[in-house]
Image: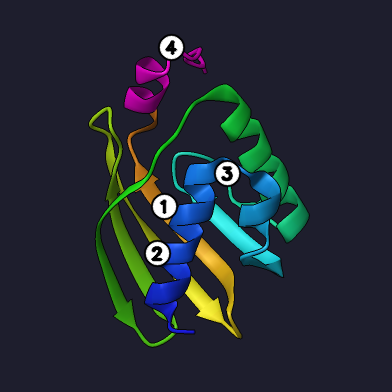
Amino acid sequence: MKSKELIIQWVEAFNKGNADLIAGFYADNAVNHQVANEPIKGKKAIKEMFSSEFSQADMTCIIENIFEDGDWAILEWKDPLGLRGCGFFHIQNGKIVFQRGYWDKLSFLRMHNLPIPTE
């Protein structure tokens, strides 16, 4: 399967809000680094992250563009509330081994009426 096709399927799983389903796209030792947060290491921890996030907010990913270069795919996305972002996915042997995402965390928290951490 091409990287682009995998990302389309990943988005479909994300939009179902099912952490078990989306975790299946990751390698056992994968890293998911949403730059607004600390990197998450390992398939189990990534599943727990998605489970927590899906329980806090109703999220929908609308594909704007997917770019593919060999084992890499770039997803430009938006959501129905106007938030935009992009994700970079490194895919090996049909599994995501590394993901980095860029989005505005403060806007996300405000849009979903979630607490804003004070540090």
Residue found 48% across the figure and 28% down from its top: 58
Give the residue type at disc 4. Asn
Q: What residue does disc 3 label? A: 38
Magenta segment, which residues?
A: 106-119
Q: Image quadrant of residue 84?
A: top left
For the residues bearing labels 2 and 1, Cβ distance under 8 angstroms: yes
Lower position in the chain sequence, tag 1 or tag 4: 1
For the residues bearing labels 1 and 4, Cβ distance under 8 angstroms: no
Q: What residue does disc 2 label? A: 88
- Residue 42 visible? The answer is no
Residue 39: percent from the left, percent from the top?
Answer: 59, 50
Residue 104: percent from the left, percent from the top?
Answer: 33, 34
Secondary structure of the residue carrying numbered label 4: loop
Q: What residue does disc 1 label? A: 101
For the residue carrying disc 1, how many other residues have a C-alpha within 10 Å: few (<14), some (14-19), or many (20+)?
A: some
Residue found 37% across the figure and 74% down from its top: 4
Q: What residue does disc 4 label? A: 113
Q: Image quadrant of residue 63?
A: bottom left
> Which residue occupies the foreground of this view, 1 or 119?
1
Lower position in the chain sequence, tag 2 or tag 3: 3
Residue 90: percent from the left, percent from the top?
Answer: 48, 74
Q: Is residue 117 magenta?
A: yes
